[in-house]
Amino acid sequence: MESSSLIRRLAEQALVRDLPVGAAQAVLALRYCILCRRSERDPMPELERRWGNILAARRYRLVVEAIGHCWPDPFAVAPPCCPRVSFDEALLADMVGAAADGDRARFDRLSSDLLGGDGREMIFVALENFIRARAPGRV
């Protein structure tokens, strides 16, 4: 493989539509939360509509707060209409998948270069709690 095509493949950003459904929803909800924060609006009504219950909406807000607290640099978020995910969003999508699978080892492998132990714990627990709240039958 030519070095230019290899570099292009490594730098290519994934499409939102290619993410697993739960991960794509989490990424798009994060984009919405960021927009709301910038415009001083409350994201809770939309999160409740998106997730189907107030508990899941509240717990997703805790995920967003944990990310804001633990991420070492500003979290790179693509514009809401952008079909591609930022590298931070792609990592979040993978972390959501690991938490949904209950795979703490994979979650740690994905995030250990970026987050310290306390940060990984905080985000993993927040994601687990959010995923449990989204389970069918929860209100």
Image: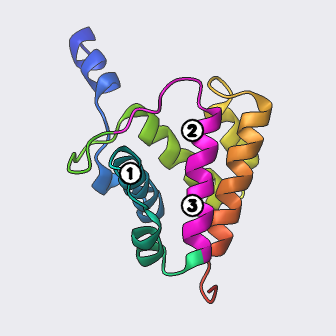
Residue 134 seen by the camera: no
Comparing labels 2 and 1, the label whose residue is closer to the camera: 1
Can you say whether 73 is above or below 18 in the image?
Answer: above
- What SS does tag 2 mark? helix
In the image, which residues are magenta?
Answer: 55-77
Can you say whether 10 is above or below 128 in the image?
Answer: above
Total tally of numbered discs in the picture: 3
Q: Where is residue 43 in the image (x, y as percent from the top left)?
A: 43, 62
Q: Name the residue at 41% across, 64% down.
A: 21
Q: Which of the two labelled residues, at mark 3 and mark 1, occupies the earlier sequence position?
A: 1
Q: Which of 75 and 93 is in front in this view?
A: 75
Which amino acid does the dot numbered 3 rest on?
Tyr
Q: Where is residue 46 in the image (x, y as percent from the top left)?
A: 39, 70
- On residue 68, the disc is 2
Q: Position of residue 54 (x, y in %)?
A: 56, 77
Label 2 CA crowd tier, 10 Å (few <14, some 14–19, many 20+)? some
What residue is shown with label 3?
60
Q: In this view, does 1 lie to the left or right of 90?
A: left
- What SS does tag 1 mark? loop
Q: In this view, does 134 lie to the left or right of 129?
A: left
Which amino acid does the dot numbered 1 rest on?
Glu
Q: Which of the two labelled residues, at mark 3 and mark 2, occupies the earlier sequence position?
A: 3
Q: Rounded to the nearest whole Å, what is the CA distance between mark 3 and mark 1?
A: 18 Å
Q: Rounded to the nearest whole Å, what is the CA distance between mark 2 and mark 1?
A: 16 Å
Q: Nearer the viewer, residue 125 or 101?
A: 125
What residue is shown with label 1?
40
Can you say whether 92 is above or below 36 in the image?
Answer: above
Tags 2 and 1 in contact by the CB under 8 Å rule? no
Tell me the quarter of the image containing the N terminus.
top left
Q: Quadrant of residue 114?
A: top right
Tags 3 and 2 in contact by the CB under 8 Å rule? no
Q: Which of the two labelled residues, at mark 2 and mark 1, occupies the earlier sequence position?
A: 1
